Image: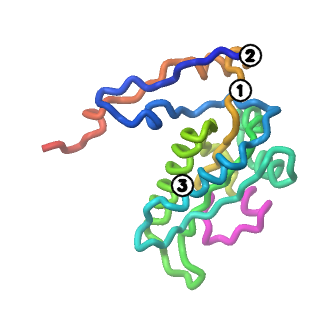
Amino acid sequence: MSVVIDRTARTDAPILDVLAERWSTRVFDPETPIDEAALRSALEAARWAPSGMNYQPWRFIVARRGTETFDRVVSSLMGFNQAWAPNAGALVVVLAESETEDGEARTWALYDTGQAAAHFTVQAHAGGLATHQMGGFVADDLRAAFDIEPRFVPVTVIAVGTLGDVEAAEEGLRQRELAPRERRTVAESLLVDE
């Protein structure tokens, strides 16, 4: 039986519970299939993220564990990510449309796509799913695997699924998962605050 671990952030000011409780795990249950309703809700939340001029520059590749699509995404992952991410119920590649088909630059595409990814992770958490966003992937491998047009920029790969048993994880991974959650203070992030 797995132990329930409280990973709630200790905040200096009140924030929504769903934000304080959301954290990025690397321990997923390798047996439980993805909760399709929760996944659809997370994608719906991403759909409703704000975007400049309502361009909605985000695109997604959704790969469920056990499929060829999933294996192609896993093969694009780098280093340590290949060790733990295959246990996730799904991997979601998040891409930004950095320019239109006519070559017009979409200046805010990366920013807007980041908001869509954030909306996805918060809704996924609210729906009982665990997530972890990764920057450790080879974009050119994803481009080749899925014949992605150059105007689409792979931004992140999100592992999503059911939280696994942290206590049963390999020692090094367990230590990383149980390490204190830390952030610099708000004051350290403020360049100007008058």
Residue 183 within the segment the image draws in magenta: no
Identify which amino acid the numbered label 3 is placed on.
Ala
x 65%, y 14%: residue: 3
Mark 1 sits on what residue? 164
Per the rendering, the mark at residue 168 is 2
Sort mark 1 into few (<14), some (14-19) or many (20+) by Cα contacts within 10 Å.
many
Mark 3 sits on what residue? 45
Name the image quarter holding residue 4.
top right
Camera-near label (3 vs 2) is: 3
Question: Mark 3 or mark 2, which has the lower sequence index?
Answer: 3
Q: Position of residue 189 (x, y in %)?
A: 30, 38
Are the two marked residues, 2 and 1, in contact with CB atoms closer than 8 angstroms?
yes
Judged left or right of residue 17, residue 164 is: right
x 53%, y 68%: residue: 57
Judged left or right of residue 81, residue 72 is: right
Q: CA distance from mark 1 to mark 3?
A: 24 Å
Question: Mark 1 or mark 3, which has the lower sequence index?
Answer: 3
Q: Which secondary structure, mark 3?
A: helix
Sort mark 2 into few (<14), some (14-19) or many (20+) by Cα contacts within 10 Å.
few
Residue 148 within the segment the image draws in magenta: yes
Q: Which secondary structure, mark 2?
A: helix
Sort mark 3 into few (<14), some (14-19) or many (20+) by Cα contacts within 10 Å.
some
In the rendered structure, which segment of residues is drawn in magenta?
A: 140-154
Q: Which secondary structure, mark 1?
A: loop
Identify which amino acid the numbered label 2 is placed on.
Ala
Quadrant into which the N terminus falls: top right
Identify which amino acid the numbered label 1 is placed on.
Gly
Q: CA distance from mark 3 to mark 2?
A: 32 Å
Camera-near label (1 vs 3) is: 3
Q: Position of residue 41 (x, y in %)?
A: 60, 52
